[in-house]
Image (cartoon, grey):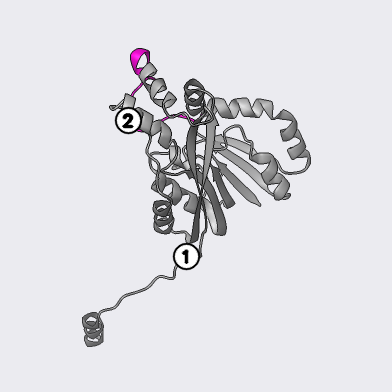
Amino acid sequence: RRILDVGCGGGAMRAPLVTRFADASWIGVDLSLPMLTAAREADFVARVLARWRGRAGARVCADAAALPFADGAFDLVLSNLMLHWHPAPHAVLREWNRVLAVGGLLLFSCFGPDTLRELRAACAEALPAAAPMPFTDMHDYGDMLIAAGFAAPVMEMETLRLTYPSPSQLVREVRLLGGNPRDDRARGLPSGARARALLQALHRQRGADGRIALTFEIVYGHAWKPPPRAQVTRITVEGLRAQLRAR
């Protein structure tokens, strides 16, 4: 009935979600207010149709680790390729558990450690002082899910390999993926000799077909929010004897 789409960006997931769950209301959350505003303006017809069908939605600008919603507000929390951008994924998972209703489902995808490995190798060769973005292993995400209070977590992974005709096109597409959340990252892109060295290092990775490969490891996770555990009261033998003596 209630779907939270975290890191919704332009809202591309909204239409398939409300089509799949015909009676559900959709709320999208993203940290970028300009992206949410632009998507809302472009989505005018879809919003009118959603209201007419009684499936009005909303877009909210918020941090995934500090959601402005009540406990247990959603039946489904979904996040597509957002979690790896956040500097504190363990805090995000705790917050997602909080806003899920008991029996609610979490579905997410994110990048794994093998993502951009070719670009990392080129940076190690041409820009040794670079601080590339780290990606978390899927087994660590599984541990975080358990620590956050989720039940029956399932983690899966697949590897996608894209190829590009030139180093500059590869770098251009990587830039469109988003920023680097590391505090010690360089504040600007390499230029001049450093930029040329990076492009040359990528050029040396050309395959027999003349194209340059780039790997993406996609991690998928899902888990459920279980009922709260019963409170256990621990009584020591000494404490029990003291109570009996007091009587």
- For label 2, the residue is 124
Q: Is residue 186 magenta?
A: yes
Q: Nearer the viewer, residue 247 or 224?
A: 224
- The answer to whether 152 appears left or right of 196 in the picture is right
Cα separation between marks 1 and 2: 47 Å
**Helix, strand or loop for the magenta stretch, by majority:** loop
Image location (x, y in percent) of residue 135: 40, 41
Image x and y of residue 96, in percent: 49, 49
Give the farthest residue toward the top: 192
For residue 52, say whether it is visible: yes
Q: Residues within 10 Å of mark 1 (few under 14, many from 20)?
A: few
Give the quadrant of residue 236: bottom left
Magenta stretch encompasses residue 147: no
Mark in the foreground, 1 or 2: 2
Q: Is residue 103 above or below residue 95?
A: below
Q: Quadrant of residue 101?
A: bottom right
Q: Amino acid at mark 2?
A: Ala
Q: Bounds of the magenta span?
A: 177-194
Query: Element type at marker 2?
Result: helix
Judge whether 189 appears above or below 33 on screen.
above
Residue 72 can be seen, yes or no: no
Residue drawn at x 54%, y 35% as measured from the top left: 162
Mark number, residue 228:
1
Residue 24, position as x, y percentages in the image: 68, 49
Q: Quadrant location of the C terminus? A: bottom left
Mark positioned earlier in the residue sequence (1 or 2): 2
**Nearer to me, 80 or 119:** 119
Residue at the image point whose x is 60% and y is 26% from the top: 37
Which residue shows up at 41% across the image and 31% down it? 119
Please tell me in which quadrant of the rendered image residue 10 appears: top right
